[in-house]
Image (cartoon, rainbow, N blue to C red):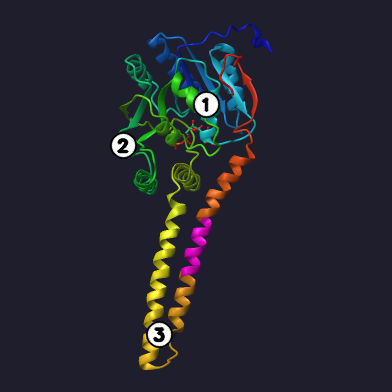
């Protein structure tokens, strides 16, 4: 490798950029980042995590790296999803502060200046909160709203509405996140779980510079289920109450039948209600089984204890990093 000459000096700021098929955005991204970093005048590194892109993202990123060795490239062996790409990125940073930013320029790099200012004032986590979600479809907006509502009610942590992965983390926070072993990584929940001194700065989401979002409704559904199951076991417990409720109802109904038969004698109607009851409660039972399955599947994933992600090659990341 040609990188052995590099001295592992920890920079002040590390940027983590997850990339999945973002080749078309890289020139603009590195341009904008370089400008902002020049204004800031801090030492920095850019840790690009290639999440198994099928286009020439890696080649393009490495090309930029040849011109500027502060750009580092962590190649994952396949697509692991954004949460794990971020996890991999965090583990390859060495800066005192770490900012995670999307590759599609939806997160304006200029906001990093404000984040650094807040960080200098002593905040350990600076969360950039989007002002509105106008850029998204009505379905996605509604889904997000329902998710935050449900999550807020059932989970042990609170998510600030509109907060995403665009945020600054102090090294202290990064250390804690790096030490978390869990496989089902719902980052937004983990950030909230770790605590620390947090502050919020609003920003306007930009249009995606190039390409399309990688999150279709199915992936968002998976993310939402991951989030809920990682932060509450309420869905498992509600079935106990559901069962008690249904059983008491059945008991009362049975008593009613006995009394009715004693007074009025036997009659046979009830076929439709029987069918409705059977299908309804089969459905309820299947749902409860499904919920148990969701948790069991996660327990299974955790006990297998496989690595969270696999790195093919980490260009420019020396031994100074917190790889666990
Ligand atoms: N991303 C990733 N792995 C994935 C999906 C997305 O690393 O499996 C990256 C993507 O390249 C981008 C960021 O995550 O830098 C946000 O993705 P996207 O813009 O598609 O999501 P949205 O902005 O619609 O939430
Ligand atoms: Mg985007």
Task: First in sequence, mark 3 or 1: give its number.
Answer: 1
Question: Residue under circle 1?
Answer: 178
Residue matched to label 2: 132
Instruction: Specify the farthest residue to the right.
Output: 1
- Name the image quarter holding the N terminus: top right
Q: Nearer the viewer, residue 183 or 49?
A: 183
| Earlier sequence position, callout 3 versus callout 2 | 2
- Which element is circle 2 on? loop
Q: Which residue is mark 3?
A: 258
First reached walking from the N terminus: tag 2 or tag 1: 2
Residue 255 is covered by the magenta coloring:
no
* Left-right relation of 203 to 44: left
Residue at x 61%, y 41% (from the top left corner): 303
* Mark 3: few/some/many CA within 10 Å (<14, 14-19, 20+): some
- Residue drawn at x 57%, y 9% is 8
Residue bounds of the magenta highlight: 281-290
Is 208 left, or right, of 162 in this rendering? right
């Amino acid at each position: 490798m040609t990188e052995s000459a590099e001295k592992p000096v920890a920079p002040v700021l590390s940027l983590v950029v997850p990339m999945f098929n973002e080749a078309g955005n890289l020139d603009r991204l590195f341009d904008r980042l370089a400008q902002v970093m020049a204004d800031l005048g801090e030492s920095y590194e850019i840790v690009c995590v290639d999440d198994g892109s099928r286009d020439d993202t890696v080649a393009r990123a490495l090309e930029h790296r040849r011109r500027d060795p502060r750009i580092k490239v962590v190649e994952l062996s396949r697509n692991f999803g954004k949460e794990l790409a971020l996890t991999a990125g965090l583990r390859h940073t060495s800066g005192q502060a770490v900012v995670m930013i999307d590759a599609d320029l939806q997160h304006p790099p200029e906001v990093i200046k404000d984040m650094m200012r807040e960080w200098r004032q002593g905040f350990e986590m600076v969360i950039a909160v989007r002002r509105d979600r106008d850029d998204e479809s009505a379905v996605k907006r509604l889904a997000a709203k329902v998710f935050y509502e449900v999550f807020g009610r059932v989970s042990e942590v609170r998510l600030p509405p509109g907060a995403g992965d665009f945020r600054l983390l102090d090294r202290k926070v990064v250390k804690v996140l790096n030490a978390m072993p869990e496989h089902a990584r719902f980052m937004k929940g983990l950030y909230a779980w770790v605590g620390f001194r947090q502050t919020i700065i609003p920003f306007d989401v930009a249009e995606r510079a190039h390409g399309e979002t990688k999150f279709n409704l199915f992936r968002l559904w998976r993310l939402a289920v991951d989030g809920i199951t990682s932060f509450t076991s309420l869905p498992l417990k509600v079935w106990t109450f559901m069962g008690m409720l249904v059983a008491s109802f059945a008991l009362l109904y049975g008593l009613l039948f006995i009394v009715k038969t004693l007074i009025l004698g036997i009659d046979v109607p009830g076929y439709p209600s029987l069918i409705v009851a059977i299908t309804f409660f089969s459905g309820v039972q299947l749902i409860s089984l499904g919920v148990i399955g969701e948790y069991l599947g996660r327990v299974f994933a955790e006990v297998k204890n496989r690595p969270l992600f696999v790195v093919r090659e980490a260009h420019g990341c020396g031994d100074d990093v917190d790889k666990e």
